[in-house]
Image (cartoon, coloured by chain):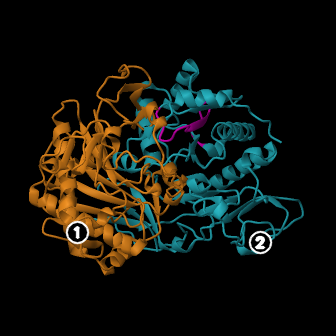
Chain colours: A orange, B cyan
Amino acid sequence: MSELRQDPITKRWVVIANARNNRPVHLKKNAEENKPGVNPFAPGNESLTPPEVFAFRKEGTTSDTLGWWVRVIPNKFAAVSLDVTCDEDLSGFHKKKPAVGSHEVIVETPDEHADIALLPHDHMTDIWRAYRERMQTLFQNPVTEYVQIFRNQGYGGGASLPHPHSQLISLPLVPKNIEEEVYHCGQYAEINGRCLFCDLIVEEQRTKTRIVAENEDFIAFCAYAPRFPFETWIAPKNHAADFSNATENMLTNIAALYQEVLQRLAQVLGKLDYNMVLHTAPRNLKSPLAYHWHVEILPRHVQRAGFEFGSGCYLVTTSPEQAAGWMRESNNPEPA
Amino acid sequence: MSELRQDPITKRWVVIANARNNRPVHLKKNAEENKPGVNPFAPGNESLTPPEVFAFRKEGTTSDTLGWWVRVIPNKFAAVSLDVTCDEDLSGFHKKKPAVGSHEVIVETPDEHADIALLPHDHMTDIWRAYRERMQTLFQNPVTEYVQIFRNQGYGGGASLPHPHSQLISLPLVPKNIEEEVYHCGQYAEINGRCLFCDLIVEEQRTKTRIVAENEDFIAFCAYAPRFPFETWIAPKNHAADFSNATENMLTNIAALYQEVLQRLAQVLGKLDYNMVLHTAPRNLKSPLAYHWHVEILPRHVQRAGFEFGSGCYLVTTSPEQAAGWMRESNNPEPA
């Protein structure tokens, strides 16, 4: 069973995916408690995973063998699938539909101990090229309404395997957070004739207090009203709704600024559990100004608890100005 | 500084409260790692907390001395305060206002090792009486638009002290989750002339598969489209928007069903980290049918990660029907 269900009170769609009960949890309370086990993402273990759908690999090497440095595979414990696994029911009190989509793992490096903040810059750019390639491919399927790319680092970030990897899930509907952001950006564009995110960047550049770092194409800043202390957003400086249209030059520059932000966070907070999420335009954006793609980095060193899950109001005990100040002052080591 | 800030993209209000940086964290990764320290909630340590605002205590004993069995005190590390701590700015690009409100701790028992699921039923009823009393009192302040009552159990639930306690935060605005629920309930009432929650209860009673337990006044069921595996809601069977109007009889019955649900969850899942949140009508509900108060119990044995925080779509790997079945079959010990 893998179905999308809508909560009648909040209208939120969730995925109920029983099969994932069986997924391995190699990270328990912390990395030190790991039971030694077979690492399905390690080079040499390619046969333990479903066949790869994309890879950067040495010329002349063949799929599902050694020679890759970034490898994309279907998730063995997929939350969604391209098979129809339940009937659609949108007319009853409770509404559901099949969770039709793809769930993939981007294995980011053959080195299970690598710190991705310190990967060579070209390597990190290839990870972003893989994101773009998979997003482009998945949007070619007309059932895809959205593709959520995300990364869980460490137990606190919800990772179940320590080997560096990110994931993507494509969905046949636009999930709640994206729908909300698109709604408010669309409303703003209609009233002001400008992109809300572009105006936010202008405001951040004017006040400067929350800016962490910049390069030619991107700006990184601590969110004004974050859900997590040290929550940092990275956005293209020039208007761009859809990540899958990012140029080669932009991929090079997002890779660099992403690594710089991760390094600065680690300098301030130490070894860091976090989530990275990529927000991009859904299919059929009403106006090209109604969205602006960006990356959110959500440090997970502080628990979100009853107040946050109950009210939807978040309690944050480090001001974004203080966080950004510490991150600016931190020593930024050069990537290898 | 304690201010409410609005995120420009999602319109979510959050609390930025720098002072809480200094709060104690006695629970680290798990209870076993606790450093021995002074427990400010222990009987005999009443002078270590701000003066109590309410208590159930033995006749003849005086405030802030021994003799209490439920004690409500202002939170020493308050997220909000009745002092105005920043200027309001609702006209600029970024919007903020003072986080004016009360943040209180309900110390649930003098016994720091008590399992609240097993407290005598009368004692648990007094805890619910304390919730009602404080909510009534805080709504008398015209600045209060909402009162969020919540409980964090264990490290996974975000508790920072192991002594059994719950908390409340009153806010000068209606937080996002409540606003959303009230919006959808209001819309439904307008179209159908009935309460959405009342109809949900009828549907759950018809299908029965998600019901966990019932008594005279309340029904407990696993949510159809939950955010957490085993997420269980408890709601009055007869329409009631506002918890602060709950009768003595209702308090007796919510106390009993709450304990039963916690016991059944512990039977199935073992020692349990969870959040309890109480959702009630905000001030100025447009129609008496536009809300229905209820309790949500959110087990926290599974991490919420990048997919959930990124998309707002939740991935749940135990179906509510399976969870409710296990909870129904569990052995329900009688309260002491």
- Number of residues whose C-alpha sits closer than 10 Å to that of mark 2, classed few (under 14), some (14–19) or many (20 or more): some
Q: Are marks 1 and 2 in contact (CB under 8 Å)?
A: no
What x and y, as percent, mark residue B178?
47, 46
Q: Residue furthest right?
A: B60
Residue A242 appears in the picture as rendered:
no
Q: Label 2 is found on which chain of the structure?
A: B
Q: Label 1 is found on which chain of the structure?
A: A
Label 2 is placed on what type of residue?
Asn
Q: In the figure, is residue A151 to the left or right of A120?
A: right
Q: In the figure, is residue A194 to the left or right of B76?
A: left
To which residue does mark 1 refer?
A203
Residue B179 vs B225, above or below: the answer is below
To which residue does mark 2 refer?
B45
State the residue at coordinates (74%, 33%). B332
Q: Is residue B230 magenta?
A: yes
Q: In the figure, is residue B259 to the left or right of A310?
A: right
Which residues are drawn in magenta?
Answer: B225-242
State the residue at coordinates (83%, 42%). B336
Q: Quadrant of residue B204?
A: top right
Q: Secondary structure at mark 1?
A: helix
Q: Is residue B174 magenta?
A: no
